[in-house]
Image (spheres, grey):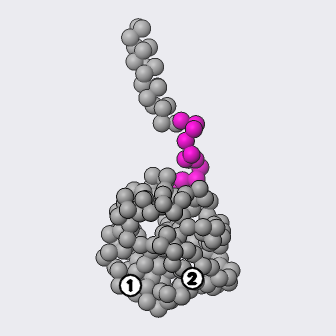
Amino acid sequence: MKKNILVILVFMGILFSGCDTKTTIDGNVIAKSKDDASNVEFISQSFMLITTDEKFISFRSTTQGLDFDEYKGKKAVLVDIFATWCPPCIEGLPTLIELKDKYKDDFEIVSVLFEKDKSKEEILEFISKHGINYPITMGEENFRLAKELGDVTKVPEMFLFSKDGRFINRFIGKVSKEELEKYIKLAIEN
């Protein structure tokens, strides 16, 4: 009997050790899996995001979506709102890297860091560790954009725009490579 109680206590200790209250990860800010083609309303305003290599990505929101100065008419753009501590965000990195390579002439990913307390050095280390091949932006402008994109409060969330800047689809949470690629092809063709 004592042996059974000890086994149960050890099991419960292991089970609940992953729920440490000291963690900075709040389960309420991790998005549940689903894709959502519902409309996002855009208000016309300008944005200028800064990348980790100190380049600017400028664009304007329109009633139809986002007009990226550099990519308009050339590339479909996936805006990926993520956090470095987010398990589904990290799990999705290989898919994003692969799709960026596969469609590099017609497709761009702009990854928007949804964290305030990360240094540039920490993000550069994250990029190197995961072999990220697309720009990651940092700064207060990221949070303003997240508000514009339907008041994002959970990660990951991704927003896909066609070459002409029209909003194509919103992805919330973990998304399969096949589903994402289906919409990317649509965004490139339109």
Q: Nearer the viewer, residue 140 or 2?
A: 140
Residue at image point 43% right, 78% down:
108
Residue at 53% x, 85% y is: 68
What secondary structure prevails in the magenta region? loop
Residue 67 appears in the figure: yes
Quadrant in the picture for residue 134: bottom left
Residue bearing mark 1 = 106
Quadrant housing residue 63: bottom right
| Residue picked out by circle 2 | 58
What residue type is disc 1 on? Asp
Q: Which quarter of the rendered picture does the C terminus lie within?
A: bottom left
> Residues at badges 1 and 2 in contact (C-beta under 8 Å)?
no
Q: In the depicted view, which residue is nearer to us: 133 or 61?
A: 133
Q: Quadrant of the N terminus?
A: top left
Q: Say whether residue 177 is visible.
A: no
Of labels 1 and 2, earlier in sequence is 2
Residue bounds of the magenta highlight: 20-32
Depicted 150 relative to depicted 87: above or below: below
Residue 59 covered by magenta stretch: no
In whole angstroms, how far apart are the C-alphas of marks 1 and 2? Answer: 18 Å
The three-letter code of the residue at mark 2 reads: Ser
Packing grade of label 2 (10 A; few <14, some 14-19, many >=20) is some
49 sits left or right of 101 in the view: right
